Image: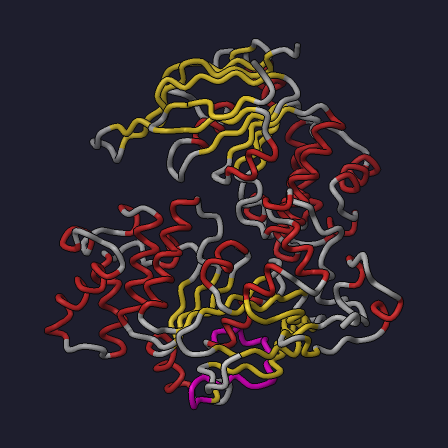
């Protein structure tokens, strides 16, 4: 039996509407446990709090209450060094891949910057190898973000993530802006990469077909709480 | 196909963009027509030229675009209509629903003001009747409490409410043709059904809809005719039921196989860059049935059992 990779415990999160407005509760006592090598899907309508939970699990946002443990390390109360090394193992693939690249820089600069910020030194051959894995040619790096298609941008965003050798990827609506044929390519690519690199995915989507195709377990987000609706992988 | 005079008739439309070093042929020799009161869907991958056609119809392409061919809307030759007349046609006779309603609305105006603005520009009803007219339009698109809805700002509305507001704006001008450009892109199922209802309301008023989408289910549910585009060309067109249930072109077949119903089977490879198109069939490098002729010889569209198809096998 595989071990628990990440666990969110009793997470509460709310946002205040303006300075004196009432606090709107987004997440209400959410708990989730994700095991190494599985894909867990989270569905729900727009504004239900799926992405907020994803950001909290990635350590990008503090919950009001509750904790997130990645391989047993509390993401919000660890020492700076532990936080830094732990967070590097968690990456997020956002919905709008084009928007995650600097529009005035060539794609090569955007790739290099990630490596520089994460302190990873990779030879150019390794970058080319990752690009090949996601089905891209190294030539693409000489282009600007507006010169590539949505599908290519999503593949490149995935390549940028893979270079940092993550253990967990949080996929926040990774195919919702893509057309059906490109969506199918990305979903199969994600499946192949998961098997090859023993990755763990948390897949956030409003498309139940995509979630059923990809995930062993599916949770639905309703009024800020999580409910399991599919459990094909675990008793 | 009906023998009636079409409301929109596009013939041999070609659009290219001239940049410093490149000429990008975004649309090549596209021809199709829309019958009054029907819905026609244009489907295809991102970047295949679907939205460019919509922008050409409304003449809102950037200055570096070069257009040839013919776009006939009712009695107007849209590519040669003078700018003041075009301003009148745009909105008043041809309306457009852009993708992302939240971004298409003015964030600092209440919905009432946003519906009123084009009414003033196009002088649809006397100003004294604006109040009643706007509330009627908001009611028609599904706002139950129009007194409250009219004074909401876009940030106070859900995506579905904003979509309905956009529909109210489009419908208030009573256009004969409505272009819906990717109206469901990135939306959840609830909001998709909101969009579907809005388009059905437009069709119920006997208006014509040009639906640009990559959502095959939406096209199935709304459109009588479907046009499939690939790399700037129309590769198949005809009645929606025939195109989507018994496709002929290998690309259309691949597109349908990519849907969840068929287990997300992807089409191998990528669409060719528009700056470096293959000399023969543009789909040949990805086609499993391609022969040598497909790679080398340009393919012209032909009529096959009442359908237009661009493939060497027919």
User: Is A211 rendered above or below residue B224?
Assistant: above
Query: Which of the pair A24/B300 is nearer the observer?
Result: B300
Task: Left or right? Give the position of B167 relative to B184.
Answer: left
Query: Which of the pair A39/A100 is nearer the observer?
Result: A39
Question: Is residue A75 visible in this depiction of the protein?
Answer: no
Question: Is residue B201 visible in this depiction of the protein?
Answer: yes
Q: Position of residue B132 (x, y in %)?
A: 13, 66
User: Is A217 rendered above or below residue B1?
Assistant: above
Query: Which of the pair B184/B202 is nearer the observer?
Result: B202
Q: Position of residue B235 (x, y in %)?
A: 67, 69
Task: Left or right? Give the position of B85 relative to A93.
Answer: left
| Residue at 51% over, 33% down | A204
Asked where in the image residue B308 lies, by quadrant, the reply is: bottom right
| Residue at 83% over, 63% down | B290
Please provide the residue range marked out in magenta. Answer: B59-76
| Residue at 62% over, 82% down | B12
Task: Left or right? Give the position of B89 relative to B243.
Answer: left
Instruction: Farthest residue to the front: give it.
Output: B305
| Residue at 45% over, 62% down | B222
Q: Position of residue B244 (x, y in %)?
A: 59, 60
User: Is B311 rendered above or below residue A141?
Assistant: below
């Amino acid at each position: 039996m595989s071990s628990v990779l990440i666990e969110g415990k009793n997470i509460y999160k709310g946002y205040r509407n303006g300075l004196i407005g009432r606090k709107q509760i987004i997440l209400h006592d959410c708990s989730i446990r994700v095991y190494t090598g599985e894909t867990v899907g989270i569905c729900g309508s727009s504004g239900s709090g799926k992405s907020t939970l994803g950001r909290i699990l990635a350590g990008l946002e503090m919950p009001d209450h509750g904790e997130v443990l990645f391989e047993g390390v509390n993401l919000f109360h660890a020492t700076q060094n532990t936080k830094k090394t732990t967070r590097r193992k968690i990456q997020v693939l956002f919905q709008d891949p084009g928007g995650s690249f600097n529009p005035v820089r060539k794609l090569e600069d955007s790739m290099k910057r990630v490596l520089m910020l994460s302190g990873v030194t990779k030879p150019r051959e390794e970058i080319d190898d990752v690009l090949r894995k996601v089905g891209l040619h190294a030539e693409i790096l000489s282009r600007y973000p507006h010169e590539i298609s949505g599908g290519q941008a999503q593949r490149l965003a995935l390549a940028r993530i893979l270079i940092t050798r993550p253990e967990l990827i949080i996929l926040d609506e990774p195919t919702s802006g893509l057309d059906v044929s490109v969506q199918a390519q990305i979903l199969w690519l994600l499946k192949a990469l998961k098997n090859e690199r023993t990755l763990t995915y948390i897949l956030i989507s409003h498309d139940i077909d995509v979630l059923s195709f990809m995930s062993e377990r599916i949770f639905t987000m309703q009024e800020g709480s999580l409910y399991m609706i599919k459990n094909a992988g675990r008793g | 196909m009906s023998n009636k005079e079409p409301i929109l008739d596009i013939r041999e439309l070609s659009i290219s963009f001239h940049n410093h070093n490149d000429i990008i042929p975004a649309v090549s020799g596209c021809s199709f027509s829309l019958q009054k009161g029907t819905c026609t869907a244009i489907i295809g991958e991102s970047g295949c030229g679907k939205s460019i056609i919509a922008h050409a119809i409304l003449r809102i392409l950037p200055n570096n675009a070069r257009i040839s061919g013919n776009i006939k809307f009712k009695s107007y030759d849209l590519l040669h209509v003078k700018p003041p007349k075009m301003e009148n046609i745009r909105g008043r006779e041809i309306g457009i629903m852009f993708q992302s309603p939240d971004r298409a609305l003015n964030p600092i105006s209440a919905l009432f003001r946003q519906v009123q603005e084009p009414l003033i520009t196009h002088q649809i009803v006397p100003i004294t009747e604006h109040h009643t007219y706007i509330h009627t339009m908001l009611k028609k698109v599904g706002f139950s409490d129009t007194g409250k809805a009219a004074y909401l700002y876009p940030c106070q509305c859900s995506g579905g409410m904003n979509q309905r507001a956009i529909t109210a704006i489009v419908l208030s001008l009573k256009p004969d043709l409505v272009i819906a450009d990717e109206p469901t892109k990135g939306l959840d199922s609830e909001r998709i059904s909101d969009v579907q209802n809005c388009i059905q309301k437009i069709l119920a008023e006997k208006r014509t809809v040009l639906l640009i989408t990559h959502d095959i289910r939406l096209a199935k549910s709304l459109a009588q005719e479907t046009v499939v585009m690939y790399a700037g060309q129309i590769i198949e067109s005809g009645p929606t039921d025939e195109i989507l249930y018994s496709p002929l072109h290998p690309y259309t077949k691949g597109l349908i196989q990519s849907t969840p119903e068929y287990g997300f089977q992807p089409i191998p490879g990528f669409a060719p860059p528009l700056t470096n198109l293959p000399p023969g069939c543009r789909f040949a490098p990805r086609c499993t049935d391609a022969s040598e002729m497909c790679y080398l010889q340009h393919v012209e569209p032909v009529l096959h059992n009442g359908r237009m198809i661009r493939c060497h096998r027919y």
